[in-house]
Amino acid sequence: MSKEKAKEKHLDIPAKETSSNEQYKQAYADMTDLNDAASAFFRIPVFFSHQNLFTLGPPQPPFSQEQQFIIRMFKEIKKVLLFPRTIPNTDQYPNTTLENIRTMINSSYGTAAALLKPTRSTAQGEPYSPFLQIEPAMAYQYGLPLLLVKQDTISAGGIWGDVGPLAPFTPLIWFSSSGVTVDEFFDSVQWKEALQNWAGQVRSGYFIQTGPEFKYTCND
């Protein structure tokens, strides 16, 4: 085939197909980023509690807004040089689920959690996985700094605070039903302030717990 004909054939590729290929490449790059987080440079470990991505949308791209939200939140946590750990993406242990969660919490310095609208109920008919209540509650009991984000299209009580304010742990609300996009939420001042405040608490706790027990110098 001549170069001219090959060029003409390349130009005949529909724009829609090219766009679809780009979506696939970006989606798989995002999934690789999630699964390869453990190979990143050292960061202070935090527990990122969220639903399985495939309960929030299709198994293949284009991903739903909810799936994109989780991926973007993961990246936002990494931007402040914290290491978001999840079960089973980055960590897995040969114990029961509750024991795995306890191990994760005991070895983390903060917890971020996102409760989004799933595509279907659980096998037991629950509106969302009960671990979205258990994991943040266990982290709170352990005293970890919490960063909670909830979609406005899902109702939840308990630690998610639909039954009343739980300040300073009142969840941030993603008003997706009002047309707020994923980018608009994460570009908002409210999110950036909450993220930086939480990250500051995480670092403070990390340095307190990993610093020397006794001080041998006096700076006063």
Image: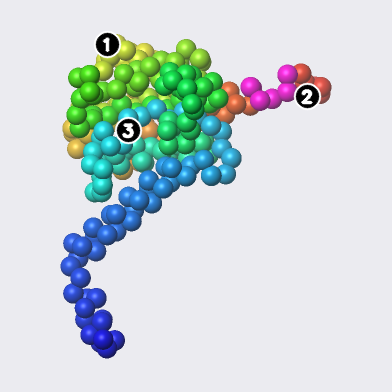
- The answer to whether the residues at label 1 and label 3 have Cβ atoms under 8 Å apart is no
Residue 127 in percent (x, y) is at: 22, 21
Q: Name the residue under label 3.
A: 52
Label 2 element class: loop
Q: Which amino acid does label 2 sit on?
A: Asn
Q: Mark 1 points at which residue?
A: 163
- The residue located at (63%, 22%) in the rendering is 209
Q: Give the range drawn in magenta.
A: 208-213
Disc 2 or 3, which lies upstream in sequence? 3
Residue 173 in percent (x, y) is at: 29, 27
- The residue located at (56%, 33%) in the rendering is 44
Vertical relation: 30 (above or below) 200:
below
Cα distance in 3D space between marks 2 and 1: 48 Å
Q: In this rendering, which labeled residue sits more in front, label 2 or label 3?
A: 3
Disc 1 or 3, which lies upstream in sequence? 3
Q: Which of 197 and 142 is in front in this view?
A: 142
